[in-house]
Image (spheres, rainbow, N blue to C red):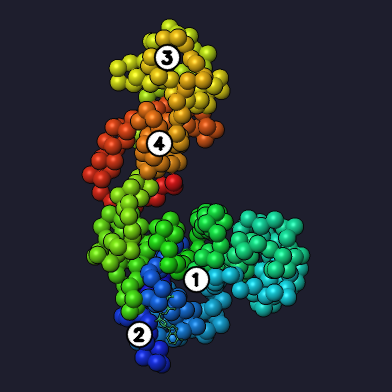
Amino acid sequence: MIRIDSVTKRYPDGTVAVDRLSLDIPDRSITVFVGPSGCGKTTTLRMINRMVEPSEGSILLDGVDIQRQPVNTLRRSMGYVIQNAGLFQHRTILDNIATVPRLLGWSRQKARARAAELMERVGLDTALAKRYPYQLSGGQQQRVGVARALAADPPVLLMDEPFSAVDPVVRKGLQDELLRIQEELGKTIVFVTHDIDEAIKLGTNVAVMRTGGELAQFAPPAELLSAPADAFVEDFLGADRGIRRLSFFPSAGLELRTAPVVAVDAGAEQLAARASADTPYLLVTDLDGRPLGWSEPADAAQGVDRERLLPYGRPFVPGRDSLRTALDGAVLSPTGWAVAVDGEGRAVGVVSQQVIGEAIRAAHAAGHPHAKAAG
Ligand code: ADP
């Protein structure tokens, strides 16, 4: 654990960048520092690896004051990733990643083998190994930056706006990759961003800071969304808090109806038997069970007419997706019913907005969700 204990940083010109900050960063989780530009995030991160020394207070790593550890030993236990990756331009990708192992005295062969393994780990094609950084896209360079930071297998990873300079699609890929790496390797990650959505997506815990270097709130993302500490945090979180919070509720418990799901070759009689007062629409699937669209009640009597099917919106995968995705599917559907599919995209049932609404109320009544669902 990293304990930040009443730390203040005053720069020589008098600027108070961080003001009596105290919080505990638990092992094997992602702790995100978020806040407007200039609120002291980078200063805080750099105090953890002693690139910046605190003016007051102390930082403890596993109970030991980091001031009492040699800087080199400390930094070796902490990988560091920055915006634009900061790669060595005159070294190949493989040698960039192998930098720290080489400094630690590994043989060239062993360091390169490790580097190749890490390229795969961060989702880079090993065919890129002999290229130079300028021959890679921004997103690929960031992956190299992450691989380089992981090379000596440090328990801690410090990341300063690592994904801020890439476009939104690449950024989402990098975020998903980081979550996967964290799950596989169990690193203690401290992540700085000015983007609240990134903080909510990645953080196990999120520290919201305000200008002047004060901690405004430190909580798991679902708790930030449900109970912002004050008007500043609420404003910083932005609109749609309630809807966004639904991302943290799983869709697994939703009661699905299967009767209204019919194959495209169903006859008029079967259709009539399946339509009922509380599920007037029928979800028509192809012969593999993949949804095609909704059939209107009046149409059912004549059998399925593919031309007249209504769009079924965006289906959700129960258990994998959140209540937010399920609700979105129901809202997008012209029938007000969401379509549930399995991992292969085959319909497993349908669920009404009303049932989703009841699940939301039940989830709220059960208290703060701590587990994180995707989507
Ligand atoms: P953030 O990462 O949240 O944008 P920083 O930690 O970089 O914030 O900066 C916090 C405050 O400290 C800002 O007002 C910034 O201008 C100031 N600052 C940062 N580095 C220095 C420095 N070396 N000397 C003086 N002031 C600094």
Asked if the beta carbon under badge 2 is closer than 8 A to the nearest atom of ligand 1, the reply is yes
Check if mark 4's residue and mark 1's residue have beta carbons within 8 Å.
no
- Sequence-wise first label, 4 or 1: 1
Residue 101 is at least partly visible in this image: no
Residue 32 horizontal side relative to residue 365, left or right:
right
Q: Nearer the viewer, residue 64 or 102?
A: 102
- Counting residues from the start of the chain, the first of labels 1 and 2 encountered is 2
> Which amino acid type is shown beneath numbered disc 4?
Leu
Residue that mark 2 sits on: 16
Mark found first going from the N terminus, 4 or 2: 2
Residue at disc 1, CB closer than 8 Å to ligand 1: yes
Mark 3 or 1: the one toward you: 3
Mark sitting earlier along the chain (4/3)? 3
The quarter of the image that holds ligand 1 is bottom left
Dot 4 corresponds to which residue? 332
- Which dot, 2 or 3, sits closer to the camera? 3
- Give the residue type at disc 1: Asp
Label 3 vs 1, first from the N-terminus: 1
Question: Which image quadrant is residue 353 in?
Answer: top left
Say what amino acid the circle numbered 2 marks: Val
Numbered mark located on residue 254 in the image: none
Q: Residue furthest bottom?
A: 12
Measure the C-alpha gap from mark 4 to mark 2: 49 Å
Neighbor class of circle 2 (other Cα within 10 Å; few <14, some 14-19, many 20+) is some
Q: Which residue was labeled with disc 1? A: 160
**Which residue is more in the foreground, 145 or 63?**
145
Residue that sits furthest to the top in the current view: 269
Q: Quadrant of residue 251?
A: top left
Disc 4 versus disc 3: distance between alpha carbons?
21 Å
Q: Position of residue 22 (x, y in %)?
A: 32, 75
Image location (x, y in percent) of residue 205:
37, 62
